């Protein structure tokens, strides 16, 4: 692959047997023996997720890279599907069947959120300080602010742009979390404007790239 070629990763949905055993034991332990879905049931949900993502993905990953100035570095990003769990996490990219059970649109929003986290992970080597994203956010919002608040100001700002362009101009469906840091991040985004937040971050990314070229 040529150095200047744009990578748009393929998201591949899978069920890990190791994950399956671990999450099954945890779920049944904390749910007083409640029945965990069968492996094939979770795999079928993964197939539905992949089909829905492939219907909706056009332009989304390329736009995330374009507006941030970052680059995807992996051609394939595995997305592991697990059973009941309230949400997802970014690395390794993991999403629960619950997100799709609520609605395919809800699943799509959760997946986009975690993929935005992933593009930061793909670019940790942009600076000698591998914490460069947080260093930028520390300087902008203060070290006393929580990690979750600062990182989600940036993640949610990018998500707002993607949601507005590709899914729905109405952003109200993104404001539903009860997490206080998430709620505060949306308040800051509404004050500053999500496009301004993205613009400032992209300027910083360009500055880092220029430093590397000197």
Image (tube, rainbow, N blue to C red):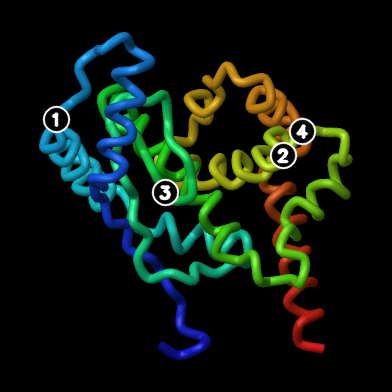
Which residue is disc 2 drawn over? Answer: 193
Horizontal side of 75 relative to 184 (left or right) equals left
Camera-side residue of 9 and 160: 9
Helix, strand or loop at mark 3 = loop
Is 15 situated above or below 106? below
Q: Position of residue 116 (x, y in %)?
A: 53, 50
Q: Which residue is mark 3?
A: 93
Q: Residues within 10 Å of mark 3 (few under 14, many from 20)?
A: some
Contact between labelled residues 1 and 4, with CB atoms less than 8 Å apart: no
- On the rendered image, what quadrant is the C terminus found in? bottom right
Disc number placed over residue 38 in the picture, else none? 1
Q: Which residue is mark 4?
A: 146
Circle nearer the N terminus (3, 4): 3
Which one is earlier in the sequence, the residue at label 4 or at label 1? 1
Nearer to us: label 3 or label 1:
1
Q: Is residue 195 left or right of residue 106?
A: right
For residue 72, side relative to residue 19 (left or right) = right
Please tell me whether mark 1 sits on a helix, a strand or a loop: loop
């Amino acid at each position: 692959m040529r150095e200047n070629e744009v990578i748009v990763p393929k998201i591949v949905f899978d069920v890990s047997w190791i994950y399956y055993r671990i999450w099954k034991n945890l779920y049944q332990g904390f749910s007083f023996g409640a029945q965990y879905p069968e492996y094939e049931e979770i795999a079928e949900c993964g197939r539905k997720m992949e089909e829905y993502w492939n219907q909706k993905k056009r332009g989304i990953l390329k736009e995330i890279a374009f507006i941030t100035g970052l680059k995807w570095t992996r051609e394939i990003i595995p997305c592991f599907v697990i059973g009941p769990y309230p949400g997802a996490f970014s690395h390794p990219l993991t999403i629960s069947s619950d997100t799709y059970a609520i609605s395919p649109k809800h699943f799509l929003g959760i997946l986009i959120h975690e993929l935005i986290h992933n593009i930061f992970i793909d670019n940790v080597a942009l600076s000698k300080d591998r914490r460069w994203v947080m260093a930028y956010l520390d300087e902008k919002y203060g070290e006393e602010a929580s990690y979750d608040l600062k990182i989600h100001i940036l993640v949610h700002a990018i998500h707002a742009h993607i949601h507005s362009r590709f899914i729905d101009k109405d952003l109200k469906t993104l404001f539903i979390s009860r997490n206080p840091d998430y709620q505060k991040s949306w308040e800051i985004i509404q004050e500053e404007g999500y496009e301004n937040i993205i613009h400032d971050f992209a300027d910083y990314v360009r500055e880092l790239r220029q430093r590397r070229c000197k």
